[in-house]
């Protein structure tokens, strides 16, 4: 498996290739809609691997406004938690600001729940058509900035499903992120 690794203060940042719903990590990020429904793509994988309890927890919470994050268990998956973010969708105004808010909210939920290991996919770059270059820059920069402060996170993973996702993250992390 190809991997890129970098140290920021006392935390480690790693770029790995794989399916975020099938990696052994304490918590991972999933991009959700305002109505807190899992949807298709990774949502289907979460339902298949995690079972119905994840959607049941989301139903009890009810909503996730744009730029916010909520946390649930991960059901039967290797991860213990899923931090669901509501990032930008379909070329809506202020994609960068909404993406940065969602990432910041996810990091805040991780800290509140004393999560030590957190994995991020490229947020919204599939079905929701967020530009991969924009996502890469905002995600790597926001996480790097967070890790430069006081944090309980020991490790943050960026998880790319394929070469198309991996290359921009590899380049941005290598530039100092």
Image (cartoon, rainbow, N blue to C red):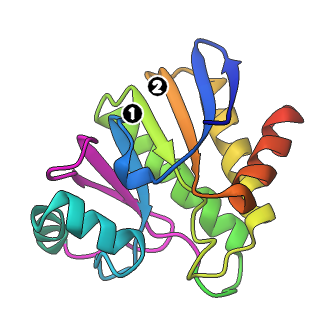
The label number, if any, that marks residue 153 in the structure image: 2
In the figure, residue 136 lies in which quadrant? bottom right
In the displayed orientation, state which residue is furthest to the front. 1
Image location of residue 62, percent across then percent down: 20, 75
State the residue lying farthest toward the right: 175
Above or below: residue 67 compared with residue 3: below
Where does label 1 land, which residue? Answer: 111
Residue shown at the point (68%, 75%) measured from the top left = 130
Residue at the limit of the structure toward the top, as seen here? 10
Q: Point out residue 173 in the picture as x, y percentages from the top left corner.
A: 78, 37
Q: Residue at x 66, y 86 (%)?
A: 92
In the displayed structure image, the side of residue 27 where residue 12 appears, left or right:
right
Residue 125, quarter of picture: bottom right
Residue plotted at (61% across, 68% down): 98
**Mark 1 → mark 2, Cα distance in angstroms:** 7 Å
The verdict on residue 83 being magenta is yes
């Amino acid at each position: 498996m190809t991997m890129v690794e970098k140290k920021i203060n006392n935390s480690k940042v790693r770029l790995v290739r794989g399916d975020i719903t099938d990696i052994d990590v304490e918590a991972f990020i999933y991009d959700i809609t305002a109505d807190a429904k899992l949807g298709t793509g990774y949502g289907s994988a979460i339902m298949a691997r995690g079972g119905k309890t994840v959607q049941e927890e989301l139903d009890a919470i009810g909503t996730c406004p744009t730029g916010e994050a909520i946390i649930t268990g991960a059901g039967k998956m290797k991860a213990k938690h899923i931090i669901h973010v509501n990032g930008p969708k379909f070329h809506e105004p202020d994609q960068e600001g909404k993406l940065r808010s969602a990432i910041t909210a996810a990091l805040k939920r991780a800290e509140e729940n004393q999560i030590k290991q957190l994995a991020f996919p490229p947020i919204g770059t599939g079905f929701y058509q967020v530009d991969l270059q924009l996502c890469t820059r905002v995600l790597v920069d926001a996480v790097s900035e967070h890790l430069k402060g006081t944090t309980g996170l020991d490790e943050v993973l960026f998880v790319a499903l394929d070469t198309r996702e991996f290359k921009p993250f590899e380049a941005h992390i290598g530039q100092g992120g």
